[in-house]
Image: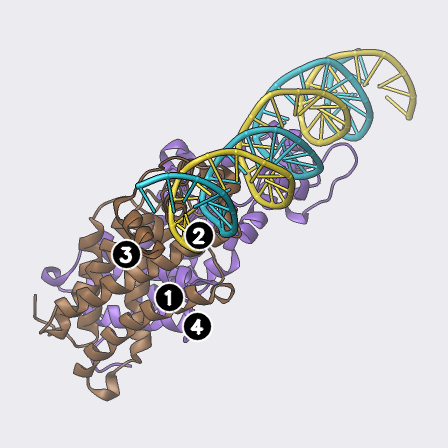
Chain colours: A purple, B brown, C yellow, D cyan
Amino acid sequence: MTSTAKFAAGQISGMSKRGYHHGNLRQALVDAALILIEQKGPTGFTLAEAAKTAGVTPAAVYRHFGGREELIAEGAQQGYDIFADLMEYAYRDGKPSALAAFEATGRAYLAFARKYPGHYQAMFESGLSLNAYPDLNLAATRAQGVLTRAADSLSQHIPADKRPPSAMFSAHIWALSHGVVELFARGNPGAKGQFPPEELLESGIGIYLRGLGLIPPDDH
Amino acid sequence: MTSTAKFAAGQISGMSKRGYHHGNLRQALVDAALILIEQKGPTGFTLAEAAKTAGVTPAAVYRHFGGREELIAEGAQQGYDIFADLMEYAYRDGKPSALAAFEATGRAYLAFARKYPGHYQAMFESGLSLNAYPDLNLAATRAQGVLTRAADSLSQHIPADKRPPSAMFSAHIWALSHGVVELFARGNPGAKGQFPPEELLESGIGIYLRGLGLIPPDDH
DNA sequence: TGTACATCAGTGAACGCGCGTTCACTGATGTAC
DNA sequence: TGTACATCAGTGAACGCGCGTTCACTGATGTAC
């Protein structure tokens, strides 16, 4: 059994501390950080807390990370990876209709924010500089690429002269999704909670796509 | 000269400390907090820092506020007041066309986020519970009311059977605006900066309104 | 199979630091006479 | 106009606390023989 295989096994089962050595402390620390971020926000937790949550001395953290920010960056990167996979899967899953596929992608966005709030905040609310973390930048770029490609293939159905750049198209959808998450899917001020976020996002995307001529005016 | 009038004068001129008494420490602390929030986020500053920025001992803060959170809440409340005024003004200013007025409101949203980043973050990114601060709740409700009324009067132009609830309408616009601010008007991951936020928001709102039938398909 | 050894992940004690909060105080300001 | 006094905003010293970071160490694990 290689050391890698052992780590992977530990990662999956969430193995607990067994004696003096932890087993897979690195991932346990990331997980702890993500839980704390979920509870108190990206700037609301301390390195010492993360160590304690993982059942370990603060000093142990330095075996794996340079400090608190690096821990958040790792969480964010894992988030982007999950996110990109999810979006890609949702898009492919929605075939054969490009439109249905696109709408599935929107729903997947919201589902991701719901299911992985810690990752989501590490990704979008931590204020990390992408320049400082090349790997994180790469993961973020890949995730954005998925969205842009989805928008791109959908906009083939729009007459070329009325077609917005697909990067703009996907930016609109991304912004709308993010805004719905931030304002209406959390305990935030704007959230007077009149509509469920899913309904809000779906109807918003519907109206937007109609505006692009992708849904006939009378449809729905 | 009443004490109130003196305070108001101090507030306007940003009067500096003059001897043992400050003049208008309460507002100076709020201003300091807003600057710190702008620089380091709502959870990234300490009460002691705010006191220092205002040129005062940490203990002095307790003459005016119960603690750090109360300070943020006051900043958020002032933000909602400015915000509501700005939106209301932008909407009225845009007459006679209801459409133009609505679009002006969208631009005003972005302008507010740009000009008052500290307030903006205190309002939307601080995670304050509105229930804990009734006055804040009131100010937030008023601000939301302005947006909803704008959406309401604009949707009069839509046939009743195709008209979405105006609360949903305004929620869409709010979410889109907020998403653009968060993702593209800051140093955030999503911000690959291909388009200026203003253009992104304006085009997004345009497509959305076309989807509602408020702009003819061929227009623009 | 057993033993000796190298590796290195995590320990725990230590440090200096800035925080939040309290308290008796001080001195600037406004007012009564 | 001047003086005595009340008010109360801000001081500064003090406290206990948890933080980040370092360091020599310890002991669990894997491996060579």
Q: Position of residue B85 (x, y in %)?
A: 25, 64
- A36 relative position to A220: left or right: right
Residue closest to the eye, A9 or A125: A125
Q: Mark 3 lies on which chain?
A: A
Q: Mark 3 points at which residue?
A: A170
Marks 1/3: CA distance? 30 Å
Q: Name the residue under label 4.
A: A193
Q: Nearer the N terminus, badge 2 or badge 1?
A: 2
**Looking at the rendered structure, which numbered label has been put on residue B72?**
2
Locate the N terminus of chain A and report the quarter of the image it occupies. Answer: top right
Disc number lying in front (3 or 4): 4
Marks 3/4: CA distance? 26 Å
Q: Which amino acid type is shown beneath numbered disc 3?
A: Ser
- A123 relative position to A57: left or right: left
Q: Position of residue B81 (x, y in %)?
A: 31, 62
Which quarter of the picture shows residue A16?
A: top right
**Looking at the rendered structure, which numbered label has been put on residue B140?**
1
Q: Is mark 3 on a helix, strand or loop?
A: helix
Q: Do the residues labelled 3 and 4 touch (CB within 8 Å)?
A: no
Which quarter of the picture shows residue B135?
A: bottom left
Q: Residue at x 41, y 33 (%)?
A: A133
Residue closest to the eye, B209 or B153: B153
- A157 relative position to A19: left or right: left
Residue closest to the eye, A18 or A57: A57
